[in-house]
Amino acid sequence: MDQEQRFQSIIERSRAHILLEPVDIDPDLAEPKSRLKVLKARHYNWRADRFCKIFGMRFSVKLPPMEQLNTIFYPQADLDVPIFIFFCLVTKRKLIAHLNINCPFDDAGYRARHVDPLVAILDQYAPFECKDRYPEWMKKYRNPCTIYGMFPQERLDDLTDCAFGYLDAYLQQVTSAERVRDPDRLEQINRFHEQFKEDIRTQDKAQGMIAKMIGADKARRIFYEVTT
């Protein structure tokens, strides 16, 4: 399975749980052109019941050769569920990945509902261990089911299957979640969502990398208008 097939599988697995409605994106942001024509990129947004936004991205770079996908699922803020992210970058020899649910709460009940089922899936695989240091800004989102770092390419199939398992379990949680009515809890969820989006916009180093190929203004617009 290559990166495009992996990306399409994520979309099809999502459609097994929710109806995805494509959202129009400015063509300059949907398919940005690189200055040296080394980049082929495509960005997507969808609407869906119980989600504010679902973001998807696929890009390929010729030199050095790399294939990347990224998806972020933003649930509506009156649902007591995490934000799902799956990032996967494949180079000639390495695999860089980030798979996580980003949780607004860390109490025992919340972990039992949302984190523990994914830990059970993770435990079906050999440990995804690496020496990469977790970025400081991401530490607050780390939990026992988080996968992050650089891995041998032979772990790609395991990572893919684990990500698919996470996504299926996550979407089942979202579709069955009850609406939050408590004002204090709603405020906490809203603050968490805003902080997460602000971190993606201002802390994610990928924006700088993309800016080198398509320009800083366009890269910034993608992160503010499409990714978040």
Image (spheres, rainbow, N blue to C red):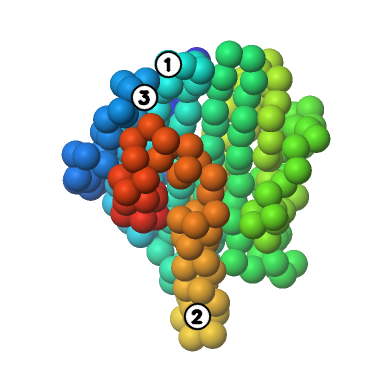
> Which residue does the numbered mark 2 point to in the structure image?
187
As drawn, which residue projects farthest toward the bottom?
183
Per the image, label 1 sits on a secondary structure element best described as loop
> Which residue does the numbered mark 1 point to in the structure image?
62
> Which residue does the numbered mark 3 point to in the structure image?
39
Q: Is residue 155 visible?
A: yes
Amino acid type assigned to the residue bearing label 1 in the image: Lys
Circle 1 or circle 2, nearest the eye: 1
Q: Position of residue 149 (x, y in %)?
A: 69, 35
Residue at horizontal 34 percent and vertical 40 percent from the top: 215
Left or right of residue 48, residue 98 in this image: right
Residue at horizontal 44 percent and vertical 50 percent from the top: 73
Per the image, label 2 sits on a secondary structure element best described as helix
Residue at horizontal 71 percent and vertical 20 percent from the top: 152
Disc 1 from disc 3: Cα separation: 7 Å
N-term-proximal mark, 2 vs 3 = 3
CB atoms at circles 1 and 3 under 8 Å apart?
A: yes
Residue at horizontal 48 percent and vertical 37 percent from the top: 209
